[in-house]
Image (cartoon, rainbow, N blue to C red):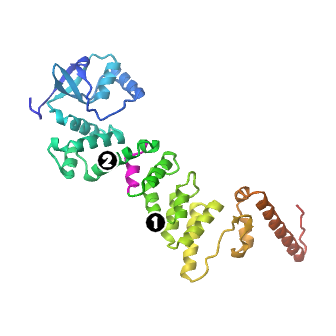
Amino acid sequence: MTENRMKLEYIDVDQIRPNPFQPREQFEKESLQELSESIKHGGIIQPIVVRKHGANYEIIAGERRWRATRMANVKTIPAVVKDVVENRILLESLVENLHRLDLSDRERENAVHDLWEKRKTLGVEQKANFAQLLGTTVDRVDNDLEAWDFRHKEKDATAVASASTYVIKESKGLEPAVRRRIIEKVDADEIKARDVYVVSKVVKKASESVKRELLKPKSHITPKMAETIVEKLPSKEDQEEVLKEAVQLRLTEDEVTARVHDIKRSREEGKEAFVERQFVVQGQWLIDKVRNPSNELLSINPDALNELNAKQKEEMLTLLTRLQNRIGELLRKLGNVKVLDT
């Protein structure tokens, strides 16, 4: 039998052995049980792939189906028998699984790495030929190899172990500690995997304050906010001003965009950039920088007051009481206006 020759047989499940080069590391018990019930009632739709090994057979692809068949107490299983030489078993198994998207990211990375290390026995040395052999792209091979390397360097980081290849790839080029932090935030669902590219881009350009705030656990600053601040405001001073407002006032993404737009317009017109929103810093209301005090007073964020200490709350109460008294005087001067004491 040549390597390209195949035939279909029904083989006793007890004559079949698992593949020692199987790329898959885990088989979920629940899904195996579901597949077993399906096989018990409807049979096997897709045959497994095996090779002759002495008096028995060795699985090339389809170990999950074989396990489920045994669980269902079915005695025989349809199998395509291929003649595959020893040094190509992992390659065959990997390609079969890749075509069915049947591997986790980590399993695929491990298999690609093992094959790349044995590339000479497969008769290839260039990544282009290697990728062609796997039926994939050079970029995908590079991503898998780099992710494998990063995981093994960060083997004590739990979040890295469970991260997707995509997340690891998109954080490439950053310092290891920063990559770990981004991956931890993805793992904690504080950053979406699709936003890692934006986060990585921002971190490379942002001021230390923006970077630190973005990577902080449970930060109010979203990737979109950080991107808007960093991409639209070249001045580090302006970036940090908007960052401070966004954090203290709990601004929304739209409000951050509006604030950035206002600063850009002021800079283009050669004017001082007014603080459009009122905010609290160490118990002080920055009224001297507010363009419209009456409007801004109404937009004060009550949550910001909860973060003040006792002394700061007292100072704030004094300030607001003075404002209340002044407003009362003005209302009385208007006449025919009843002022209610509170």
Tell me the residue that label 1 is attached to: 205
Query: In the rendering, at what x and y percent does residue 167 appear?
Result: 41, 50
Q: Quadrant of the C terminus?
A: bottom right
- The answer to whether residue 310 is left or right of residue 333 is left
- The answer to whether residue 150 is left or right of residue 5 is right
Badge 1 marks a residue whose secondary structure is helix
The total number of labels drawn is 2
* Mark closest to the chain's N terminus, 2 or 1: 2
Query: In the rendering, at what x and y percent does residue 339 appear?
Result: 89, 67
Query: In the rendering, at what x and y percent does residue 117 appear?
Result: 23, 43
Which corner quadrant of the image does residue 28 belong to? Answer: top left
In front here: 130 or 99? Answer: 130
Tell me if residue 233 is in the magenta stretch. no
Tell me the residue that label 2 is attached to: 144
Residue located at (44% from left, 63% from top) = 204
Query: In the rendering, at what x and y percent does residue 237 appear?
Result: 56, 72
- The answer to whether residue 228 is left or right of residue 342 is left
| Magenta span | 162-172
